Amino acid sequence: MRTAYLPGLALAFVLTASALCADRARAEGNRDGAYWNRLDVAEKTDLVIGVLEGLNLSESILHIILQNEYTMCSDILISIARQTDVFFEGLTVGRIVEGLNALYVDGKNRSIPISWGVWVVARQDKNDRTVGKFIQELRTLYR
């Protein structure tokens, strides 16, 4: 009986932790292109590594939570993880840093959060033909 509540409690914990981290990031300032442009190369590299580790950790936690209780959600998560792997396959941290440098040269992109900028770079690396539209949507969302 108690194990039935475990997935819900774990998800609540993950969401609470994410909210606390988001509040801290807001308090420290926006992690966008303007912030990116103030960093040195080592800080940029560390930040990208952190984004990638966070992506892997969140996928792992959600997979653990969903795998036994919610088969349909687990299947969707596995599909998303496979798509993510395709976008990031062969993409090095150095190339992501270079791509973000290029993205944030354009002042119209500076309000786009770095985490989304990483996705822009990954999509550009795979020659995704919809990346231009994606950038426009991000510019509109993060004015």
Image: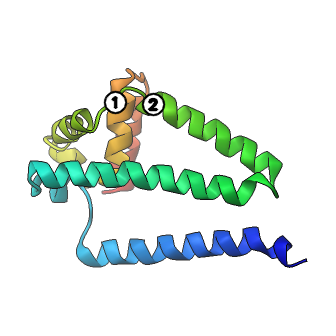
Mark 1 vs 2: CB contact within 8 A: yes
Task: Give me the residue at 49% from left, 28% from top.
Answer: 86
The answer to whether residue 136 shows anywhere in this view is no
Q: Is residue 127 left or right of residue 92?
A: right
Tag shown at residue 91: 1
Of residue 79 and residue 61, the one placed in the foreground of this image is 61
Task: Give me the residue at 85% from left, 71% from top.
Answer: 4
Task: Give me the residue at 26% from left, 54% from top.
Answer: 47
Q: How far from the left and from the top, in percent, is residue 109?
A: 24, 46
Does residue 5 lie above or below 80 as drawn? below
Residue density around tag 2, few if under 14, some if 14–19, many if 20 or more, within 10 Å: some
Task: Give me the residue at 11% from left, 48% from top.
Answer: 41
Does residue 14 lie above or below 83 as drawn? below
Can you tell which of label 1 and label 2 is closer to the viewer? 1
Judging by the rendered image, the residue that carries numbered circle 2 is: 87
Of residue 103 and residue 22, the one placed in the foreground of this image is 22
